[in-house]
């Protein structure tokens, strides 16, 4: 099983792929120097396996490595995840 997270900017989302098949998404909106994660979803039969965490972590890693955007967490899951991972708090206060 190969998990991959890819950014799909034309759809304003990150996708979690398992062996090339989309099993999850993290949607976002770009505005005023920020990337606002608005919704995260994993296919119903794939939940409870830590996949949402993998998706969010890799999406945030991409934001950190490839932009200076500030992260806004409108999505409750992303907000919770950030609360559990203090090493990502700096993304919330970037100047973008």
Image (spheres, helix red, strand yellow):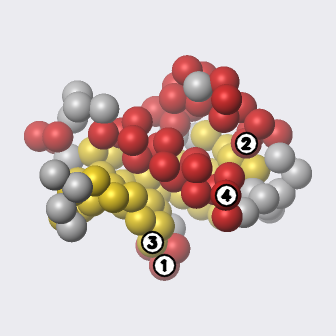
* C-alpha span from label 4 to label 2: 11 Å
Q: Residues within 10 Å of mark 1 (few under 14, many from 20)?
A: few
Residue contact at pointers 2 and 3, CB within 8 angstroms:
no
Q: x, y percentage for residue 47?
A: 21, 35
Write down the residue under mark 2. Answer: 91
Residue contact at pointers 4 and 3, CB within 8 angstroms:
no
Q: Quadrant of residue 33?
A: bottom right
Say above or below: 27 vs 71.
below
Q: Is residue 70 left or right of residue 13?
A: right
Q: Residue at point 40% right, 47% down?
A: 55
Q: Residue furthest right?
A: 95
Question: In the rendered structure, which disc, 1 or 4, sits on the residue that comes first in sequence?
Answer: 1
Write down the residue under mark 3. Answer: 8
Say above or below: 36 vs 8.
above
Along the line of sight, which residue is nearer the eye, 57 or 41? 57
Please, what secondary structure does the residue beneath circle 3 have? strand
Q: Which mark is residue 87?
A: none
* C-alpha span from label 1 to label 4: 20 Å
Q: Residue furthest top?
A: 84
Viewer-nearest of discs 4 and 3:
4
The quadrant of the image that shows the C terminus is: bottom right
Q: Which mark is residue 65?
A: 4
Q: Residue at point 51% right, 29% down?
A: 81
Q: Which mark is residue 10?
A: 1
Residue contact at pointers 3 and 1, CB within 8 angstroms:
yes
Viewer-nearest of discs 3 and 1:
3
Q: x, y percentage for residue 56?
A: 47, 43
Would residue 54 be visible to someone looking at this image? yes
Q: x, y percentage for residue 51?
A: 30, 39
């Amino acid at each position: 099983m190969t998990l991959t997270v890819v950014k799909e900017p034309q759809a304003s989302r990150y996708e979690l792929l398992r062996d090339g098949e989309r099993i999850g998404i993290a949607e976002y909106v770009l505005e005023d120097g920020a990337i606002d994660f608005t919704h995260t979803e994993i296919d119903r039969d794939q939940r409870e396996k830590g996949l949402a965490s993998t998706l969010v972590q890799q999406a945030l890693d991409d934001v950190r490595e490839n932009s200076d955007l500030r992260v806004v967490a409108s999505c409750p899951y992303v907000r919770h995840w950030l609360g559990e991972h203090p090493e990502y708090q700096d993304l919330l206060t970037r100047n973008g």
